[in-house]
Image (tube, rainbow, N blue to C red):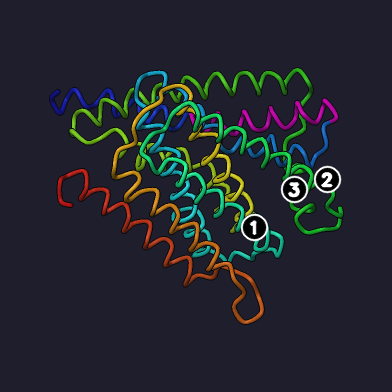
Amino acid sequence: MTMTSLILPSLLLLIGLALLVWSSDIFIDGAASTATHLNISPLVIGVVVLGFGTSMPEIVVATLASLDGSPGIAIGNAVGSNIANIGLVLGLTALIAPVIVKSSILKRELPILLAISVGVYLLVLDGNLDVLNGIILLLALVVVMFWMIKANKSMDPSDPMAQETLQEMEDMPELSMKKSLIFLIGGLLILMISAKMMVAGAVEIAHYFEVPEVVIGLTIIAIGTSLPELAAAIAAARKNEADLIIGNIVGSNLFNILAVMAVPALLAPSVLEPEILRIDMVVMLGFTLAMLIFALPLRGQASIDRTRGLLLSAAFFGYLYMLYLRSTGGM
């Protein structure tokens, strides 16, 4: 493949990425509005619909990559997105405005995310990502969703976490049932098309530069599918609503590690590359632990300030540099 022939894969990747970011918002609006018309509780919508919605780009990309015989992209996307959500999204958001951490997030969601991340790492420590692993991941996802729904239903409406969920629902556009379904189905179709474009472009680029597909999944695909979270985080920080972000990141990472990792396990069982276990999943666990530690109260208030945001961002870009050295044989 010549440098000129790299133009088409690059265009496919960039156009697919732009469409992916746009269609994910359309899909989430349509899904949330449709659920509202079906009289589903706003708190349940906040947990299930918005949780799945924010991870839908990763899920669709992982599905198409696995069906195309590129499970490395799917696995890299799941692990890389969790790293990007903490290092890039949370790190940059904290640089704009300190992220206040609610007590329920600190005491409940963050420890659960860390425990599940460790559990998934131990599950695949033998190097195999097979159908049994996929079933276990999906069962764990169902348990987590039921727990989150139960926790939200039993929450006092005046609780800050409940107020945040309801606020997210109020920010959704009001759509008729017909328009909601158009947004839902149309958004999903465009998501699938754009994900197909991204995967096709990414595979060609990986072959051109002779780097493992998993590295492309960890970098370009992972950052690309995390762009909706980044855009929402920056917008929230500018509105002084940065406290909404960490809850969204925890929810997104839970869905990524359980739902997205389950896709290649079920559709394209494979042997994990040693570097994924030895480096990338360990880095993911390190970022998750750092988020929990950084969220601990400092002088009476639980928040991730600009200094901690700078550390997270620097660690993320350091990780990208390490990936660059790895792909070029420098380590």
Q: Which residues are magenta?
A: 20-39
Task: Report the predominant secondary structure element of the magenta stretch.
Answer: helix
Question: Would residue 61 be visible to someone looking at this image?
Answer: no
Question: Would residue 55 be visible to someone looking at this image?
Answer: yes
Q: Which residue is mark 2?
A: 153
Kind of residue at disc 1: Lys
Q: CA distance from mark 1 to mark 2?
A: 28 Å
Q: Which residue is mark 3?
A: 165
Image: 227 above or below 37: below
Corner quadrant of residue 209: top left
Q: Is disc 2 placed on a helix, strand or loop? A: helix
Sooner in the amino-acid sequence: mark 3 or mark 1: 3
Please tell me which residue is depicted at 21% across the width and 43% down the height of the picture.
327
Please tell me which residue is depicted at 68% across the width and 27% down the height of the picture.
30
Position of the N terminus by quadrant? top left
Q: Nearer the viewer, residue 127 or 230?
A: 127
Q: CA distance from mark 3 to mark 1?
A: 16 Å
Q: How many residues crowd around disc 1 within 10 Å: few (fewer than 14), some, or many (20 or more)?
A: few
Label pair 3/1, CB-CB below 8 angstroms? no
